Amino acid sequence: MSAVPREQIALLSDKLKAAGKKVVFTNGCFDILHVGHVRYLAAARELGDCLIVGLNTDASVRLIKGPTRPINREDDRAEVLLALKSVDYVVLFGEPTANEVIVAIRPDVYAKGGDYAAKDLPEAQVVETYGGKTVLLPMVEGKSSTRIINKIKE
């Protein structure tokens, strides 16, 4: 399984909605998958009928997390996400925000971790323009890729 090509994501979303599906979108790096990710993605999927994950490209992860990241390449990260029963589709994006992907998908629900505030998410503002809803999901305390990496380094 591989990610949906970027140029096909709008058509896919339109087909899902035409079939009466409630589309949920979330995004992130998902570098080293851990229980926090798994629970977060499962909770996001419960908000609708279909979960599309916007996955940061390797180049964009480096810009966000620094030159030593990602640990896992984008194709590998996409494959691992697609193996989860909660994830229906993955689409790669390299922009600083997921705004362009959101404009293409127009999800009914945009899910993001509770470590963010909706007012600080540019994506939430885009979702609001067409009547979509942003939902902040609780984070699993103490679980992060960075924490795993730091523990390995110790």
Image (cartoon, rainbow, N blue to C red):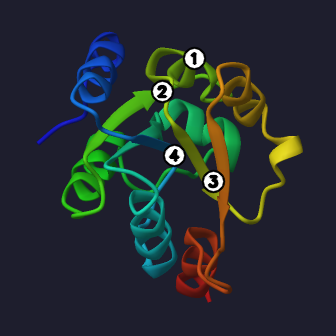
Marks 1 & 2, CB-CB < 8 Å contact: yes
Look at the image and tell me in which quarter the N terminus lies: top left
Q: Which mark is residue 100?
A: 1
Mark 4 → mark 2, Cα distance in angstroms: 12 Å
Q: Is residue 45 left or right of residue 106?
A: left
Looking at the picture, does residue 17 appear above or below residue 103? below
Which badge, 3 or 4, comes first in the chain's sequence?
4
Looking at the picture, does residue 144 appear above or below residue 105? below
Camera-near label (1 vs 2) is 1
Mark 3 → mark 4, Cα distance in angstroms: 6 Å
Q: Secondary structure at mark 4?
A: strand
Amino acid type, mark 1:
Glu
Q: Which residue corresponds to the image point at 72% horizontal and 65% vertical from the top-left? A: 114
Mark 3 → mark 1, Cα distance in angstroms: 16 Å
Camera-near label (2 vs 3) is 3
Which badge, 4 or 2, comes first in the chain's sequence?
4
Mark 2 → mark 3, Cα distance in angstroms: 16 Å
Which badge, 2 or 3, comes first in the chain's sequence?
2
Q: Secondary structure at mark 2?
A: strand
User: Which residue matches tag 4?
Assistant: 26
Mark 1 → mark 2, Cα distance in angstroms: 9 Å
Amino acid type, mark 4:
Thr
Q: Which residue corresponds to the image point at 59% horizontal and 74% vertical from the top-left? A: 144
User: Which residue matches tag 3?
Assistant: 112
Q: Which mark is residue 93?
A: 2
Report crowding for label 4: few under 14, some 14 to 19, many 20 or more residues within 10 A (C-alpha).
many
Q: Secondary structure at mark 3?
A: strand
Pinpoint residue 88: horizontal percent, then vertical percent: 25, 47
Report the residue that reaches farthest toward the left.
1
Q: Which mark is residue 153?
A: none
